[in-house]
Image (cartoon, rainbow, N blue to C red):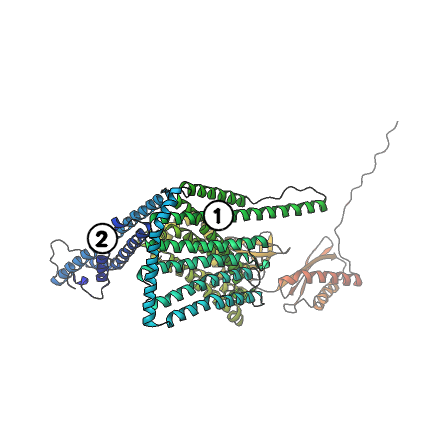
Amino acid sequence: MAPGAWAQAPDDPAAEAKTQLNQADKELKAIRTALPDAETRETLTPLFERAMAVQRDADDAQAALQPELDQLDTRLTQLGTVPEGTVEAREVAQQRRSLTQQRADIAAAVARAKLLAVDAKQLGADIEKMRVTQLSEDLARKVNSPLSPSLWRKFARDVPADLQELGQIYRQAETTARKAIAQHGWTAPLTGLAVALLLFFPLRLWLRAAGRRYAQSERAPDGRLRRSGLAVWLLVVGTMLPGLACVVFFGALDAIGAIPPRLEKVVFSIQVATYIAAFITALSAALLVPKRPSWRLLNLDDAAAWRLRKYAWGAAALTWISIVLMALNRAARTSAITTVAVDGLIAITYMALIIAILVSLARLHRRQTDEAEAKLEAQAQSDGKAKGPPRRSGWIVVARLAGHIVVAAAVIATLLGYLNLALFVAQQLVWGAVVLLAASLLMKFADDLATWLLCPTSSVGRTVLLTTGLSESRVVQAGVLLSAGLRICVILLAVMALTAPLGNLSALYGGLDAVSKGINLGDNLVLKPSSVLYAVLAFLLVWAVMQAFQRWLTDTYLPKTELDAGARNSISTVTRYLGIIAAVLWSLTALGIGFEKLALVVSALSVGIGFGLQAITQNFVSGLILLAERPVKIGDWVKLGDQEGDIRRINVRSTEIQVGDKSTLIVPNSELITKTIRNMTMGNAQGRIQIQFTVPLSTDVAMVRQTLLDAYTDHVGVLADPAPSVFIDSIANGQVAINSFAYTSGPRAVYGVRSDLYFTMLQKFAAAGIALSSPTDIHLVRDPAPPQAP
């Protein structure tokens, strides 16, 4: 490829990246040119979004160019350097010059992309500072007080001109609508109106009733999800259908050109206002439920629920009117005095509404306090004990106090002429309350949904139990973790919703976009949220597959083999840990951490593993040896020191031994490898019985021998092969020492069989008159001393 030819290749990503950089550079210059003419926050916000788009384009171009640069570096490295005194072949030298030129061009483009990204980021930060400064200036701007007569005199003087402007807009809208209808007819407007009315009234009411019927039926989930799910359903239906009705109606008018360009922003504001107002009313219906107290999520009585429901309707109507009036003021270019007067009236109305809500909440709190006190008094009279006053919630008191302080400050700001500040505070109070209530509802719904989905008794929970083999407690824990994740998402959405009226959502999006591109943790290692998600999904997928394979191996295949229980357990345990290792390695690969980087990490941790984790590593390796060599296995009866018992489980770190009193002895695997251990059932499954006693020398030893053999033969627990045997062990001191042996089917049967044989032997010896020798006791008796003579 000739030098510079990469820039002309139509399908070359480097050429596309260079073109993208050129366009980004032109866009950045255009933003700088338009920045001095931006006088309001509404005009600064689009410029900020354009600057963030330039930064994203520059980052994308750099991401497209970097692989090309790395590939060229690799090819140049393969060519190596030319030794001094040698002449390089012509073809190789030409290829080296071509690659060097290409690398220089791409490196310059990468540097340019980095510089453009930094410039765009800095320009966005400057625009954001300007927007914040303008917001501060708007909030600090002082105008005439609503109590000032001069304000209303100026307002009365400018009202005719403003009404004339509004009339001109009305006439323009009417003229445009008449022309559009005359050209296209009434079909589209009437159809849009009919669909809008159908969405708003019959369909909305039917969907709400259908949701209530389902929540009350037996098909609905049990528990708290019935109420929270119904509340979310009412919120979604009550928000979406009125907004869709408004969008459909104006969309039908726009389809025939019945909306003039001057009113397009007003129409868009009406649609936004409809969605917001519908959201407020639907949220109040979902939380208050005035007609069905048993489904109410808030701790309110019926009177407070009805009163707050009316206030919610008032807040929704006031919000809709304020948004539409602001849009009309901008479209009609009304006078500043009219804008100030309208803002003052809206602010005062907001303050009156908020004060009414606070008074209603105070009355509700007093009623609840009186009821609690009455209940405590009744309980105290029944118990005969005096009880203190009921405890009040501290955060409720603080919230009410803060609300009164903010409202008082807003009222004072309104009276002093700081209308922008008062209106901003009032709107933020209403919007903040709406967002917090919606967030609390969604958090309850997220918690109820997650715990229901991963409940062992639900259909999803049973499916998870059957497919993954997890215990019920683990499934419940997964539900708790899912609930935490969903609630974190709700909190992030609430933060974004609270930030939206401030106008800096673009900055938040820019930060999220920067985070989504990854966090640089070192050379060639970028941690991206998508990579983390892929790693988690890869781990869960591989782990689930290995769990299914292990269950098939344990329940289906291994029982069909001739392996004993210990061998089957060893294979199952090794398979489980191999599955975990495979899942971890796969997740690390999905995270972008290759095996070469993992080897570097392991080598760096080798010293720490050698010293700090020496015991754990030793036990782990010993566990692998136990599972491979199987000197002991599950079911073996072992004796370790003064402890003995049955091996119940062999893990990679420790072994569990159940001793005679049914307690569990947990032994590190290194103890079973490095120390002497007696395996009672390893080499031979038979158990041996030994009975020893002595008889006098005058006893008929032949009869003794036959009696013992008969006792062994008669007992069902004694094996015929090997046959029992009786021996004379020694003859000394007038005693004959008898020693006998017999065998049972297993060591665990020795104790019981030997006890039975003792009973039988003593009975037969007594019947035959055979006496057993007993230890001779020697007692020394000292005669008393003779009495002394007086």
Please state which amino acid type lies under the numbered disc 2: Lys
Q: Residue at x 66, y 61 (%)?
A: 750
Q: Residues within 10 Å of mark 2 (few under 14, many from 20)?
A: few
Read off the residue under disc 1.
352
Q: Residue at x 39, y 56 (%)?
A: 324
Read off the residue under disc 2.
29
Decide which of tag 1 and tag 2 comes sooner along the chain.
Answer: 2
Please state which amino acid type lies under the numbered disc 1: Ala
Residue 665: percent from the left, percent from the top?
Answer: 58, 54
The quarter of the picture where residue 46 lies is bottom left
Toward the viewer: 356 or 752?
A: 356
Residue 640: tell me if it is visible: no
Q: Residue at x 52, y 48 (%)?
A: 356
Answer with left or right where residue 694 lies relative to residue 451: right
The label nearer to you, 1 versus 2, is 1
Q: Secondary structure at mark 2?
A: helix
